[in-house]
Amino acid sequence: MLKYILFLSVILLVAADNNGIEALIDKGYSTGIIMLYRGLGALLVFMLFAIYRKSDLKPKRWKPHIFRLIINGLSAWFLIYSFKFLSAGTVALFQRMKLPLLILIAVFSKNHRSSLQFYLSIWTIFIIIFFVLSANIIDEDPKGFLFIGASIVLSAISFFIIKKQSETEGGMSLGVLYLGGIVLWGLGITSYRGAGFEVAFNDLWLFVLSGGLLALISICSIILFKRYNAEKVRLPFALGALATLGLEMILENKIFTTSHIGLSVLLIGIMITICLNPSDPVKISK
């Protein structure tokens, strides 16, 4: 029962979080401001949870963390900036493309993966290329794919760093440093541009909500990774991308084109299959 509650929670949280970021972008807030206040809110909630759990937040080795702070912060900047050009549903969908990339890297690194996962990952790459080339047909700005693509690559690099760090570091300390990197990048970008740190009072609830959602997603992720393998953990996130698309259409009272919806459903279906990695069908004898 706990598994289904966690999975459903992640699906809903991901959908709400992506649409919340898009709402802040639509209100004209800079990427730095969104990163700063969203990260601060998430960091506060996350640390309160860590203190409640009496978790050890002190890193054992600082050097790898410094590199990951740079990678994670830059990845988050590319991700949020892509919302300026792409819909929330498309950003959420392409975030999940890290999975086939990691599958292909694992196979070419001679790590075991099933043939089904490997070939589906290859087909996913071809469909993504078609998706990008059809940007004008599905009413998306092609520039956005460059930013989300950069975020995916950096996120994949970060995954391998975290995988190595998890052998010696606790999940909560890794989470704190991830959110800390977002805050530092947001502070640095906003200070560099000299745009000021003010936000409208009426929009404070959106920043609080966005930070809370990010913290809850991070906490759920840590719990899931402790219980399940990496592919299974990504299942609710893949479904969350589809939920993002549906919620976006409801909130903005719009309908995406048939091509957009069709390609999104096709890609999410492939992601779900990769995550589940089903065994060969068994012949049922009469």
Image (spheres, rainbow, N blue to C red):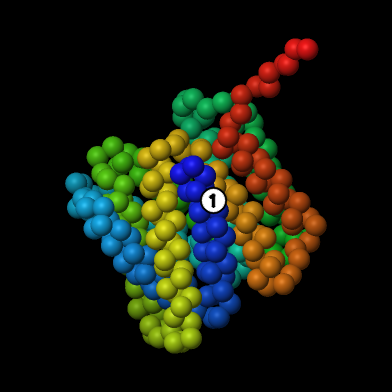
Residue 224: x %, y % from top left:
43, 44
Query: What residue do we see at 46% from left, 69% from top?
Result: 210
Furthest-front residue in view?
1
Q: Which residue bears the numbered disc 1?
A: 8
Q: Please indicate whether residue 211 sits to the left or right of residue 114 in the image.
A: left
Which residue appears at 52% of the width and 27% of the height? 113
Residue extending furthest toward the top: 285
Task: State whether residue 39 is above or below residue 106.
Answer: below
Q: Residue at x 48, y 75 (%)?
A: 206
The residue that appears at 28% across and 37% down in the rendered structure is: 167
Rendering quarter of residue 74: bottom left
In terms of image quadrants, where is residue 49?
bottom left
Figure quadrant of the C terminus? top right
Q: Secondary structure at mark 1?
A: helix
Judge by depth and name the residue closer to the eye, 268 or 205. 205
Q: Position of residue 47 (x, y in %)?
A: 28, 61
Q: Name the residue furthest right.
A: 258
Label 1 CA crowd tier, 10 Å (few <14, some 14–19, many 20+)? some
Task: Note whether residue 254 is visible.
Answer: yes
145 sits to left or right of 177: right
Left or right of 209 in this view: 114:
right
Horizontal and vertical percent position of residue 44: 31, 66
Using the rendered image of the protein, determine whether residue 136 is visible from the camera's viewpoint. no
- Looking at the picture, tell me which residue is in the foreground, 121 or 258: 258
The kind of residue tagged 1 is Leu
Counting every numbered tag in the picture gives 1
Instruction: Return the x and y of residue 80 as percentages of the image width and height.
Output: 51, 66
